[in-house]
Image (spheres, rainbow, N blue to C red):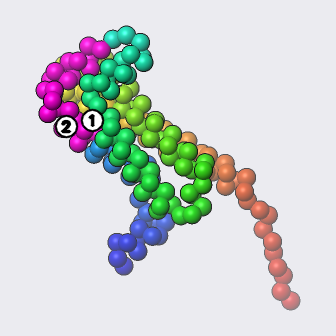
Amino acid sequence: MTERAALATPAGRRPATAVMLVLSICGMAIGLAIDCGTTPPDLLAALCAGASGSLAATLSFHVAVMPASYAMMGVAALLAAAFNATNAGPDRRTAPHLAAAAASVIAMLLGMFAGGWLAPDAAALLGIGPGFGSLVAGMVAGMTVVAAGVSAIARALDAATARAERKPAQYIMYQ
């Protein structure tokens, strides 16, 4: 059996959440490499750790300091959503499913921000000095938590929808 045939079967299909998470992390890593070309990694971590103010101001600061990271992560998440939609079949290419994919992309971006924002505090709680490594780990952790949450919500909605769409079984008796 070829790899393509294995992926066509439900048992061999890669979970949509895993595809989105892996591609998003890869996009973020490419973006971080670009951002680190203009701003040294330690300075980037110090700037993000020192950002203060309202949540909106901190978010805009993070996006200003790491524009490629957020842009590449968003592009990768959109590619993952498109990949997942084409692999899911025609019944999954409806407006609600596409809206859910768009919401997942936004949630991943917010998870990346939240993880980076909370990374200095988490590092202090763990006794680790704030730095570029803890910033990256925080962003990946934030994206992972959001991906798991989005996946759990999607499974719950799918299960609720499947229960609502069930029709009573019809039995035909043969004599």
- Please, is residue 136 above or below residue 105 in the view? above
How would you classify the magenta stretch by its main secondary structure? helix
Residue at horizontal 32 percent and vertical 26 percent from the top: 63
For residue 153, what is the image quadrant?
Answer: top right
Furthest residue to the top? Answer: 53
Where residue 58 sits: x, y (%)? 36, 18
Q: Earlier in the sequence, mark 1 or mark 2?
A: 2
Q: Say which quadrant the C terminus sits in.
A: bottom right
Residue at horizontal 35 percent and vertical 46 percent from the top: 76
- Please, is residue 162 above or below residue 62 in the view? below
Verify CB contact (< 8 Å) between mark 1 and mark 2: yes
Tell me, yes or no, whether the highlighted magenta stretch contains residue 42.
Answer: yes
Instruction: Give the left or right position of residue 153, taking residue 74 as reference.
Output: right
Tell me, yes or no, whether the highlighted magenta stretch contains residue 41.
Answer: yes
Furthest residue to the right? Answer: 175
Q: Residues within 10 Å of mark 2 (few under 14, many from 20)?
A: some
For residue 119, what is the image quadrant?
Answer: top left
Secondary structure under tag 2 reads helix
**Which three-letter amino acid code belongs to the residue tagged 1?**
Ala
Looking at the rendering, the stretch of residues picked out in magenta corresponds to 28-51
Instruction: Give the left or right position of residue 67, taking residue 102 as reference.
Output: left
Furthest residue to the bottom? Answer: 175
From where the camera sits, is residue 82 visible? yes
Where residue 120 sits: x, y (%)? 27, 19
From where the camera sits, is residue 124 visible? no
Q: CA distance from mark 1 to mark 2?
A: 6 Å
Secondary structure under tag 1 reads helix
**Which three-letter amino acid code belongs to the residue tagged 2?**
Ile
**Residue bearing mark 1:** 68
Instruction: Give the left or right position of residue 76, taking residue 32 as reference.
Output: right
**Residue bearing mark 2:** 34
Q: Residues within 10 Å of mark 1 (few under 14, many from 20)?
A: many
